[in-house]
Image (tube, rainbow, N blue to C red):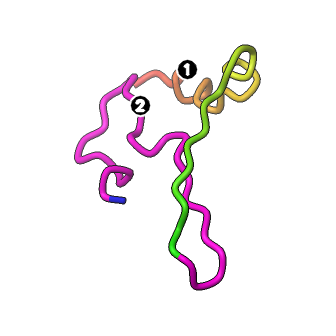
Amino acid sequence: MASWAAPEAWFAGSVHPGRGKYLIKTGERNGLPVSLSLVGEEWELYDTDAAIRQVQP
């Protein structure tokens, strides 16, 4: 899990190391790590970072 933690520093345009990664937990069982990858038009449909990119420093 340490590799999914927040990076020590954030740089504009960089991708968070945990982006698209999830841990599925049920009951007392160990978590199941999964990764989500967008394909085709999904990149435009689910671009939740667009507003952040438009912010001027």
Magenta span dominant secondary structure: loop
- Tally of numbered tags: 2
At horizontal 32% and vertical 50% (from top left) the residue drawn is: 3
Farthest residue in the top direction? 40
- Up-down relation of residue 22 to residue 42 (above or below): below
x then y, percent, for residue 13? 40, 22
Q: Residue 54 carries which label?
A: 1
The one nearer the camera, 55 or 39, is 39
The mark closer to the camera, 2 or 1, is 2
If the image is split into quadrants, where does the N terminus sit? bottom left
- The Cα–Cα distance between marks 2 and 1, rounded to whole angstroms, is 16 Å
Q: Residue 36 carries which label?
A: none
Residue kind at label 2, given as amino acid type: Val
Do callouts 2 and 1 mark residues in contact (Cβ within 8 Å)?
no
Q: Residue 15 carries which label?
A: 2
The one nearer the camera, 31 or 38, is 31
Residue 26 forms part of the magenta stretch: yes
Task: Tell me the element at label 2.
Answer: loop
Farthest residue in the left direction? 8
Task: Tell me the element at label 1.
Answer: helix
Q: How crowded is mark 1: few (under 14 residues within 10 Å), some or many (20 or more)?
A: few
Give the magenta range.
2-29
x then y, percent, for residue 19? 49, 40
Residue kind at label 1, given as amino acid type: Gln
Please identify the quarter of the rendering in which residue 41 is found: top right
At horizontal 51% and vertical 74% (from top left) the residue drawn is: 30
Which label's residue is closer to the chain start, 2 or 1? 2
